[in-house]
Amino acid sequence: MSQFSFLAKTAYRDSRRNRGKLAMFMSSIILGIAALVAINSFNYNLVEDVDEQALSILGADYVVSGNNLPNDEVKSMLDSLPGDTAKLIELFSMSFMPKEEQTQFVRIKAVKGAYPFYGKMVTEPTNAAQSFKGGNQALVDEGMMINYNLQVGDSIRLGSKSFLIKGKLISAVGSTGAAAAFAPSVFIDYDDLEATKLVQPGSLLDYNFYWKLPKDFEIDQWDEARKTSFRNSSLRSTTLAEQKRELSEAFSNLNYFLNLVALVSLLLGCIGVASSVFIYVKTKINSIAIFRCLGMKGNQAFTIYFLQIFVLGAIGVLVGAFLGSAIQLLIPVVLSDLLPFEVTTDISWRAIGEGVSIGLIITTLFALLPLVSVRKISPLRTLRTNYEGDTQDRDPLTWIINIAIVLFVFLFLWRLTSEVMTAAGFTAGLIAAFLLLWAVSKLIIWAVKKFFPRHWSFVLRQGLSNLFRPNNQTQTLLVSIGLGTSILTTLFIIQGLLLNNVAQMDVGKQPNVILYGIEKSQSQGVEELTDKYDLPVIQNVPIVTMKVEAWKGKSKLEWLQDTTTKTRFWAANREARVTYRDTLDESEKLVKGSMPKHVNPGDSVFISVDEGWAEGLNLDIGDEVVFNVQGTRIKTYIGAFRDIEFRSMATRFFVVFPTGVLEKAPQFMVVVTKSPDNTTTAQYRREVVKNFPNVSVVDLGSILAAVGEILKKVSYIIQFMAAFSILTGLIVLLSSLLLSKYQRIKESVLLRTLGASRRQILRINATEYALLGALSAATGIFISIAGSYLLATFQLEMDYNINWLPILAIFFIVTGLTVLIGLFNSKEVVSKSPLEVLRNEVG
Amino acid sequence: MQEVLSVENLTKTYKSGSKELTVLNDINFSIAQGESLAIVGSSGSGKTTLLGLCAGLDTPSLGSVSLYGKKLGSLSEDERAALRNEYVGFIFQNFQLVPTLTALENVMIPLELNGKPHPAKTAKELLARVGLGDRYDHYPSQLSGGEQQRVSLARAFSNAPKLLFADEPTGNLDDDTSGSIEDLLFELNRENGTTLIIVTHDNELAAKTNRIIRLKGGHSISDTQNVKTAQ
């Protein structure tokens, strides 16, 4: 015990004059842990809130919804449920505001009954949430009312019917700010919906049925027994328990991303820890040799420095946990528009506890890497300062620590993702990046030595040879700066890909206005109106809605009962929106068979279908498919497979009939056009809605703008979180470069003593740092390109392309910062007398 | 008299690339309690290597070193450290004080390592004895070379060593300071009855010891008793 107290005392005494040197060490831990605690606190609060708020998001104990009404069998099942019921029909349509002569694409919600049973609609005036029902009145989204300068008492036209605005809708059950940006909600009474004439064959409606059940009713059990029946009639049911699960799953993606950011910050922090402890140990070698010479055992010397690092690390971890708890207050503010409810910002002791334990373990592991060498430092160094025989051999303990680190990272990731393979993949990726950087550094050292340009100037040769001289920092800096750069660049590339993907939808000759719900008789009028505005009619196609009834000789029901098939029923369950034509359009390619031509009465009907759709039903060329076209059965055969380009904005069809079959079936038309600017779109839209109230005009431009707005927010969050990583990365850079300060200071002083000018010293250092910075950044960027390519291709399934500008910027920023910080380190050498510098460094 | 240190057939070779370099070749000597010995030779003669081997800071390639009857070759690094702490004191040419500890704390290290009672009191007495009674709380960088070597002397004698190794103790000091440090070294040596082994190329300093071993190219070329001091 007295030994320990002596070691503890010595640890304290020895640290007094070194605490500044350990500031870097502390700051990298602080930031890493702050990110982890902030993100975990937010997540835990979110999970608690999800539990509490699932009820008010769902608005009921049980919900059944779908694009069609339940059939008789399902209806009788649902009718047997006890408790109160409510109904809500949702559809998208144009609205027209006569006051400002403006139109807006809205989400109409027609409500019947006491919806919502839980949670509440917040309106202004408050009683409007109840009083809007009946008598052609509506509640309109607050944002939309502000945008169009609408007041309570103004009117809004939906389809063929005008409604009086009874109140301003401030928040509705289960909706998010982001959804409102896409299409603001307008609530009306269910009984007023018919008068709008928006509900027609082929209209896309979403039916929702709500129940408030008696407390003792076992809905999960009841639902489980009937789920298949619901699914078979294209309805989905949600119980409260499922809603909670779904919400948690939905947020687990956000959680996953945020945790990855935390992990990145933590790992960067760890690199900072390892490199700053490495610097520290280097400066302590002589003291350790003296201790050893005076009779101190290896483990005792190790204990002294371990205690110092552990105590400072623990302080750093605690400060980080405190800072993280403070930062978590900001996250909900940043994310508020994307969350359907307000997240509480309580202090999460669980997150703090976890952050502190993870921080202590990981800090200790990474600090141990350079610290274990303390045990081996030979007392012989007191007699021979250049002696290095003690550090030549590989310490087996280093391998054990390395394995422990890999294991810890893997376990941490496993806990994070709950998937062994993902965790293993990510861990392997990190190891690969590390090994690649290490190999590159070895290669550079070898290449510079081998092809050393002997005819270069003194300054350049000095700078270059610093890369391979004894005590060179090539490996340490390349690995730490390179790893940091690669992690940050990957974040930027992925963010760029996401944004680019959306931007692509709105470029060039892509159509940007779609009119649907046009009756056949209105088709000519709509085309004329489009001509009047000098807009091209890119598509004017008929649409017939139908359902798949049977295929390959078996009815849908028989297929459903056959548990051995691998059929994916989305293809059969969805209401098929079918067009008829004899040619391919621009966005599709023929992959198999030939495009079916005009059918004369009595001929077999061959159709062309999307390859993926056919795969869903396990269909091949020549297979029989029977469709139910609003009561009439049509037998068809697969004639061709098409491959559809889904990113195109024009309408696309899974199933295309040839001409000569559907011409007389109930149908509506869709017109696709391209407007040159927003003003034309607004005027055109207004006139269409005025003349053809049942026609909906979808302005893709404004939808894309809204989606862009959402993505901007998402990218803002990514950047906000990435700021943690950037800051930690910068600290790693600083601490890595501080390492070089202690490495290079004696050489620089010697050169100064021998008469090197201030300019020469700076240029020698600048050459070395520029090379190191550029090589680290380039290798890091290469790794991130490879990593993000794999991520984009296999995980996100996006086309890969890179915006080189920000990457070039990262390259120059990292290189520039490396040179700048490196030169800042040499400032002391060049501005003070050599003796003064040496005396300070010794002290 | 009890034999303190015994060196038998001591050889040290280093590998330099593919070649083997012999820096010490078949050295034999022993030293009794209270004796003082100077190992003299020019640069590269192997004297510092010999000191390192005698003090157990390094391991021989051939031969053995016994300290108080214990063969150093059979001990681990930590066991040799414990032995040093118990029996050995050091003085170095470049003082080798821990830069982050004060003068007092530097002197206290061997005492505290040994678990001796009242380390601060003993260390203060020793510092006063070497004339630094008013510099306890100064860091090495705040002391002159001579003062640092005095601290080093105080530290070397703090655990009352039976054997003191001095590696060019005045090599980094001017003549005046050297003289006072040498005097202090021999005074303390006499007062404590310590066995002293000095490595030096300074013949004047060597002449103050009982016995001189001369090294050249790793070989011992003479081992003579110093008649003047022996008397």
Image (cartoon, coloured by chain):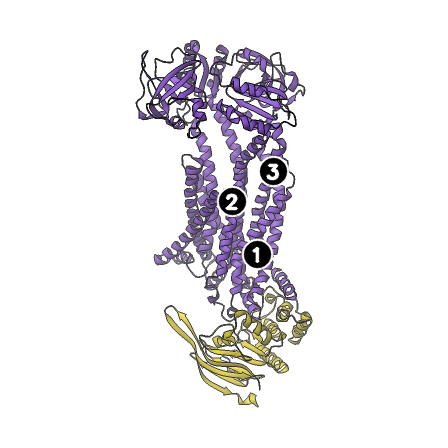
Chain colours: A purple, B yellow
Task: Decide: few, some or many residues near mark 3? Use Cα within 10 Å; few <14, some 14-19, many ≥20.
Answer: some
Q: Quadrant of the C terminus of chain A?
A: bottom right
Residue A578 percent coordinates (x, y): 40, 18
Residue B154 percent coordinates (x, y): 62, 74
Q: Are marks 3 and 1 on the same chain?
A: yes
Look at discs 3 and 1 and give the one toward the viewer. Answer: 3
Residue A778 percent coordinates (x, y): 42, 47
Q: Quadrant of the N terminus of chain A?
A: bottom right
Helix, strand or loop status at disc 3: loop
- For residue A330, the mark is 3
- Looking at the rendered structure, the kind of residue marked 1 is Lys
| Subunit under mark 1 | A
Q: Is residue A772 visible?
A: yes
Q: Is residue A843 above or below residue A322?
A: below
Task: Decide: few, some or many residues near mark 2? Use Cα within 10 Å; few <14, some 14-19, many ≥20.
Answer: some
How far separated are the C-alphas under marks 3 and 1? Answer: 32 Å
Task: Decide: few, some or many residues near mark 1? Use Cα within 10 Å; few <14, some 14-19, many ≥20.
Answer: some
Q: Is residue A431 above or below residue B219?
A: above
Look at discs 2 and 3 and give the one toward the viewer. Answer: 2
How far separated are the C-alphas under marks 2 and 3? Answer: 27 Å
Look at discs 1 and 2 and give the one toward the viewer. Answer: 2
From the viewer's perspective, tell me whether residue A626 is left or right of residue A288: left
Front in this rendered view, residue A651 or B150:
A651
Among the two numbered marks 1 and 2 on one chain, the one whose residue lies closer to the N terminus: 1
- For residue A21, the mark is 1
Q: Is residue A104 visible?
A: no
- Looking at the rendered structure, the kind of residue marked 3 is Leu
Q: Residue B94 occupies which quadrant of the picture?
A: bottom right
Front in this rendered view, residue A186 or B22:
A186
How far separated are the C-alphas under marks 1 and 2? Answer: 35 Å
